Amino acid sequence: MERHEYDVVVIGAGGAGLRAAIEARQQGKRTAIVCKSLFGKAHTVMAEGGAAAAMGNVNSSDNWMVHFRDTMRGGKFLNNWRMAELHAKEAPDRVWELEAWGALFDRTKDGKISQRNFGGHEYPRLAHVGDRTGLELIRTLQQRVVALQQEDEKLHGDPEAYIKVFAECTVTRLLKDGDAISGAFGYWRETGDFIVFDAPAVVLATGGIGKSYVVTSNSWEYTGDGHALALLAGARLINMEFIQFHPTGMVWPPSVRGILVTESVRGDGGVLRNSEGRRFMFDYIPDVFKDKYATTEEEADRWYDDQANNRRPPELLPRDEVARAINAEVKAGRGSPQGGVFLDVSTRLPAAEITRRLPSMHHQFKELADVDITKEPMQVGPTCHYVMGGVEVDADTGAASVPGLFAAGEVSGGMHGSNRLGGNSLSDLLVFGRRAGAGAAAYVDGLAKRPAVTGLDEAQTEALAPLERSGGENPYEVHHELQRTMNDLVGIIRKSEEISEALQVIEKLKERAKNTASSGSRIYNPGWHLAIDLRNMLLVSECVAKAALLREESRGGHTRDDYPGMSAEWRRRLLVCSAKPDGTSITVEEDVQPSMRGDLISLFERSELEKYLTEEELAEYDAAVK
Ligand code: FAD
């Protein structure tokens, strides 16, 4: 079996993984970057809108405190406040650092990095490159990796002496020595050969879980691998009930259903209308946001030119609100012909401006749906986009509860609470990718001896099992049934009976998954790969469904038809998922969030906090502001 020894193994080559690897290497650690797909092909590359950072380039009133407040509001105050604080404070430095490494952001007229409006952000805050920001972010981070490799070539005569990429290589198990991480086990996609990494520290940066749902903006790799690897290694997942359904995915043609239509369309003036031509978002402004959003079309339209004296258009409410509103319009029979609503930018901006600001959207609709967005509206509807839940980590170091395990980016939990604001993921990757890389490096420095790799035989037997069965279940059928179940029963609007039904189906699917068989050999065999991924999707889906059943309130990316209100009692309660020791099932326990630090809670008005906090917490607030 191919074996490699590293100090730090980073699993995932999106923004979080690359930033973590760069940091670990800069701290002198021998670092491997392992990724399931091609190097450069990650969700980060697909990010369109931009990276949120309170640089104040377009509106000088912006600063980290406003960003912190917006993030907490977006997450409905369930966020890990320390993460939200670090994120708001450090995001500008991470964006400027990217610029220093060669990123070419769009510019304001006076030459600063331009920033655009996005849902839930009080000021224009997203640093962007047209609607291809993720591409520039990944290009820059990859360029930085290459620059470090060139340095290593000069210093050590080997460009891969300190940082090496293992692309199209899927990790299926984390290895341990006693309680501590000792490495990772995986296979090469092309040959099916196994590979082992001996390493005392592993950083998970594997992204999301969207492939558990039928309608999703996520691509094939996002099967919740990092979430499951962490669970199976003994780590805890939090907030798994909170799934973000992005309000605007393509609804037609069916082959591309779910593909993302960036929020920048709305940020740049696009409006949502139902089949009656009504700008329906004015009917869906929740009480907690009433004073912040325009109540007439005239005020909303004035806001684009004069943000100081007008309130924002309700199309820019946080994503959970907009997704629920679209869902309600379609359910009420006021949807578009293909089952979505209309998103129109064609009557709002000149054609040349649309193609300049939204080149990818123009291309995407022309190529995939034969729709010219400069002339006609798009049809859009909610799509499973992002998981707020993930590995519970220490905010400052990215350390999980298992010694030697770290996580950053979408696979980690806490930062976004119950709902992520658009643009806050790209900045999250940079801030916490760097911190996890530094955390892993410091952990390695503190070790007295390297842990030993164990568990290789079990990992190998588990991976080979689907190839060794004959006449078993078809993994594609099991996957499809799981996707339908999650979409229909644990989707955007949930109720107790349906979630319970989903859990029963998941139990049956777990049994069927144990018996999946993949024909063919180990050489480039997607059926085999899917059979392996099923374990992860089932574990993650069980977490989502079990936590969703327990949380008897509606908040952010978790809407219960049978518990429509938001409850102050539930706000502080975290649902924590762990795998039973044999890895076959999930248990969910309750934990309590620590109170927000006095200087942070004092950034809010009492009248706002009254909408979220219990009387006991308000008393703490009163003491803090005294
Ligand atoms: P990813 O970028 O998803 O990378 C995950 C990596 O892990 C990949 O390299 C993958 O191959 C690897 N991997 C996974 N499993 C394994 C395994 N078992 N073994 C080895 N490798 C593995 N956010 C914003 O802030 N602004 C935006 O404008 C924006 N637009 C978006 C548009 C789209 C279409 C999508 C899908 C998301 C968008 N997001 C946006 C969200 C954001 O892009 C993602 O949340 C973020 O990029 C996740 O980054 P990450 O580094 O955590 O993981």
Image (tube, rainbow, N blue to C red):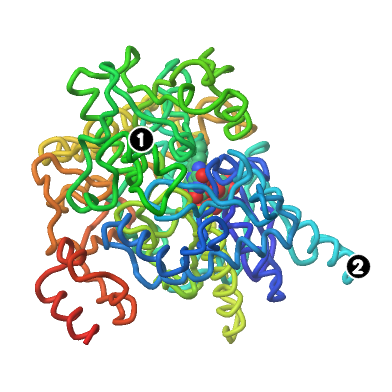
Instruction: Choose the circle earlier in sequence order: 1 or 2.
Output: 2
Out of 151 and 109, give the one closest to the viewer. Answer: 109
Q: Are marks 1 and 2 in contact (CB under 8 Å)?
A: no
Task: Give amino acid for label 2.
Answer: Lys
Residue drawn where x is 73% and y is 63% of the image: 100
Q: Residue at x 91, y 67 (%)?
A: 154
| Image location (x, y in percent) of residue 598 | 29, 82
Residue plotted at (55% across, 55% down) = 58
Q: Residue at x 26, y 29 (%)?
A: 280
Kind of residue sitting beneath label 1: Pro
Across and down, in percent, residue 565 comes to 11, 49
Residue 417 placement (x, y as % from top left): 32, 59
**How dense is the environment of label 1, judged by Cα within 10 Å: few (below 14), some, or many (20 and up)?**
many
Q: CA distance from mark 1 to mark 2?
A: 49 Å
Quarter holding residue 435: bottom right
Q: Secondary structure at mark 1?
A: strand
Q: Quadrant of residue 201?
A: bottom right
Q: Is residue 248 above or below residue 305?
A: above
Residue 277 appears in the figure: yes
Question: CB of residue at label 2: within 8 Å of ligand 1?
Answer: no
Q: Which mark is residue 154?
A: 2
Q: Residue 330: image x %, image y %?
A: 24, 23
Residue 319 marker: none
List the residue tagged with mark 1: 247
Front residue of 442 and 276? 276
303 is higher (above) or lower (below) than 446: above
Q: Of helix, strand and loop, which one carries label 2?
A: helix
